[in-house]
Image: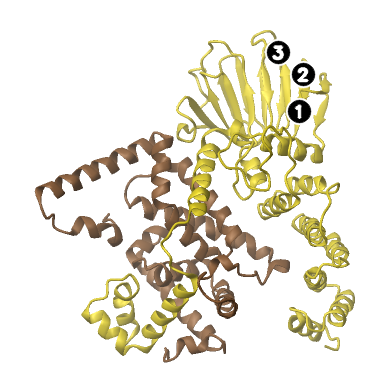
């Protein structure tokens, strides 16, 4: 038997179409036989039950509903979807909903197609989606939307609503043209009459006219901005604002630890949920978003394990930003936790220090790790690294 | 492009009567109508299609990422991406193949992201939910240890090789179908599978806990 035979009969053996020739090959080829047995064993270990439990069916429904909401309705999905945990959903759906009182004005027929990409597929039937490269402009009636960063937004002419899904845009609105025009962001609302301003998911800068910024959930006045002024939401406040919006979401099945009692208006996500979201944000290199979520945890009561994870995530955020020195310090600080997993942070600090090229400090940290955790999970690697660095293992 | 074998099986059988042929035709028309509705963004059609395939997707994703929580995140993103991009589904492959392709791509990205985080997340504990639930606690512990070791070996393969191995050996997908899923030609797919097998077998042979599972493998 040779590799060609193995490849020829592979479909028969593994895709459940075993014919006589395949069966003969399977009985004669020890490599295929052992792999076939391994697959059978692994599948048996993993469990091959075809029964769908009621809980599983509910979870599936929730996932599908969330996907439908998330993909099609950015304003509502900003408040209740889970995509890599809810705050990633928040990032995806952190749609700035521009409820534009544009009256009967329709999108301008003349679109600057050179840089704007028309992508109606991603929007609701009544919406038209746009994707703008930096510097591109899109006319929507008397409103001009220019992208400062790559921006995705959709325009719903029926609801007179412009929804910014990502990026930052400058909105230019002639004075008096659209009374009552306002911008809804995940955590705040910008009221304008006639002005030119830049908005992204966390800040507003006025370039002409004036705007008022209100809390989206409480309508409380947060700022009144004049020309040249910039307002930025406090990260922790943003997390809380959005989390409250999340709790009010009209989603069939919210994640269990966020599900509020009937009638509750504000529920802060559980620390575990915030941690999970922060982790996902870091995985997507959204360090600012992760930091804002971690900031919101500062006032929460955390278990030692959660505190350790929060500290480790801060260190990892430093690492993503290229601040390896700060990351080592962060991991070292996290390692002081009484939680059992502190060992991991301690070794992370040592390994990172070794990779940073500070041998004496790395040696010290590795030796410290081995002294504290002689049976630790990373003892072998620690000893090997110590040997590499010339220290006694 | 032919439909994957798995989904052709029913259609390939000769109809037993005119009635069943009509039923097949009507099902085909229904499916076409369903796909068209999905392309138009019809939510109920999308929910129906996703509901038909979510269990397969969940299983594939779970075997790709080996972590229940991560798998749910990947699955959620897969479903959302599918809804968002259904209008671009050209019907050149079966819907399930297309959906699995999305899931595999997202799992691959997820694995790449996770790689950077191994500093403090490795080894990932294997959740009980991954294991056959009817086993005793002792047996589950043993199974978990075995699966964790296998997971570790698999995680050392490159994502492209790993996904081909998982799809073929654990998921029972044909080479042709896998080629469609991963967007490669069949030659490349076979090559990845060959390399994955070779590498995995080498690793398992040196693992005292797993080498008995490979008894007789000498290639």
**Mark sitting earlier along the chain (1/3):** 3
Q: How many other residues sit within 10 Å of disc 1, few (<14), some (14-19) or many (≥20)? A: many
Instruction: For mark 1, name the chain.
Output: A
Q: Residue furthest top?
A: A176
Q: CA distance from mark 1 to mark 3?
A: 15 Å
Dot 1: element: strand
Instruction: For mark 2, name the chain.
Output: A
User: Are discs 3 and 2 located on one and the same chain?
Assistant: yes
**Mark sitting earlier along the chain (1/2):** 1
Q: Percent position (x, y) of residue B208? A: 57, 89
Q: Is residue B37 above or below residue B125?
A: above
Instruction: For mark 3, name the chain.
Output: A
User: Does the CB distance between marks 1 and 2 fall below 8 Å?
Assistant: yes
User: Which chain appears yellow?
Assistant: A
| Residue where numbered disc 2 is placed | A211
- For chain B, give the colour: brown
Q: How many other residues sit within 10 Å of disc 2, few (<14), some (14-19) or many (≥20)? A: many
| Residue where numbered disc 1 is placed | A204
Based on the displayed image, in which of its 4 quarters is residue B41 positioned?
Answer: top left
**Mark sitting earlier along the chain (3/2):** 3
Q: Which mark is residue B46?
A: none
| Residue where numbered disc 3 is placed | A194
**Of residues B187 and B77, the one drawn nearer to the viewer in this rendering:** B77
Q: Quadrant of the C terminus of chain B?
A: bottom left
Based on the displayed image, in which of its 4 quarters is residue A222 positioned?
Answer: top right
Q: Residue furthest left?
A: B18
Dot 2: element: strand
């Amino acid at each position: 038997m040779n590799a060609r035979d193995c490849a020829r009969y592979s479909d028969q053996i593994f895709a459940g179409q075993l014919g006589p020739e395949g069966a003969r090959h399977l009985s004669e080829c020890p490599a295929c036989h052992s792999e076939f047995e391994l697959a059978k064993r692994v599948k048996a270990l993993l469990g091959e039950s075809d029964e769908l439990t009621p809980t599983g069916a509910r979870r599936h429904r929730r996932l599908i509903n969330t996907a439908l909401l998330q993909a099609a309705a950015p304003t509502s999905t900003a408040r209740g979807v889970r995509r890599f945990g809810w705050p990633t959903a928040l990032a995806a759906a952190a749609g700035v909903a521009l409820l534009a009182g544009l009256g009967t004005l329709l999108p301008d027929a003349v679109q600057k197609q050179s840089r704007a990409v028309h992508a109606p597929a991603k929007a609701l039937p009544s919406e038209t989606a746009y994707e703008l490269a930096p510097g591109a402009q899109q006319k929507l009636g008397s409103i001009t939307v220019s992208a400062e960063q790559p921006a995705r937004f959709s325009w719903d002419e029926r609801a007179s609503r412009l929804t910014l899904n990502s990026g930052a845009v400058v909105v230019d609105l002639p004075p008096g043209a659209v009374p009552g025009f306002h911008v809804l962001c995940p955590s705040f609302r910008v009221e304008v009459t006639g002005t030119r301003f830049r908005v992204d998911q966390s800040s507003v800068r006025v370039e002409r006219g004036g705007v008022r910024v209100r809390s989206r959930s409480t309508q409380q006045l947060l700022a009144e901005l004049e020309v040249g002024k910039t307002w930025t939401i406090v990260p922790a406040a943003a997390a809380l604002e959005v989390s409250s919006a999340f709790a009010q979401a009209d989603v069939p099945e919210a994640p269990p630890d966020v599900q509020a009692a009937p009638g509750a208006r504000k529920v802060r996500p559980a620390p575990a949920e915030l941690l999970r979201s922060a982790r996902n944000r870091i995985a997507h290199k959204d360090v600012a978003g992760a930091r804002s979520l971690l900031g919101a945890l500062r006032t929460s009561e955390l278990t030692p394990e959660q505190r350790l994870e929060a500290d480790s995530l801060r260190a990892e955020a430093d690492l993503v930003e290229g601040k390896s020195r700060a990351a080592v310090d962060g991991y070292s600080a996290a390692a002081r936790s009484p939680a059992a997993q502190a060992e991991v942070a301690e070794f992370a600090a040592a390994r990172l220090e070794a990779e940073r090229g500070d041998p004496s400090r790395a040696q010290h940290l590795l030796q410290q790790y081995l002294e504290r955790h002689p049976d630790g999970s990373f003892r072998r690697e620690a000893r090997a690294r110590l040997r590499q660095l010339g220290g006694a293992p | 492009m032919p439909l994957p074998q798995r989904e052709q099986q029913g259609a390939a059988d000769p109809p037993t009567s005119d009635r069943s042929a009509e039923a097949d035709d009507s099902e085909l028309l229904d499916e076409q109508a369903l796909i068209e509705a999905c392309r138009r963004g019809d939510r109920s059609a999308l929910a129906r299609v996703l509901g038909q395939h979510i269990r397969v997707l969940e299983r594939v994703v779970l075997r790709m990422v080996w972590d229940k929580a991560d798998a749910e995140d990947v699955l959620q993103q897969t479903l959302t991406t599918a809804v968002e991009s259904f209008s671009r589904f050209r019907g050149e492959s079966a819907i399930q193949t297309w959906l699995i392709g999305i899931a595999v791509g997202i799992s691959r990205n997820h694995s790449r992201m996770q790689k950077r985080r191994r500093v403090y997340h490795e080894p990932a504990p294997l959740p009980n939910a991954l294991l056959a639930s009817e086993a005793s606690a002792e047996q589950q512990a043993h199974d978990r240890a075995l699966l964790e070791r296998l997971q570790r070996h698999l995680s050392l393969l490159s994502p492209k090789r790993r996904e081909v191995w998982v799809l073929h050996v654990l998921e029972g997908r044909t080479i042709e179908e896998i080629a469609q899923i991963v967007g490669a030609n069949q030659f490349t797919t076979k090559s990845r599978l060959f390399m994955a097998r070779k590498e995995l077998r080498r690793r398992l042979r040196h693992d005292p806990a797993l080498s008995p599972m490979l008894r007789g493998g000498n290639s």
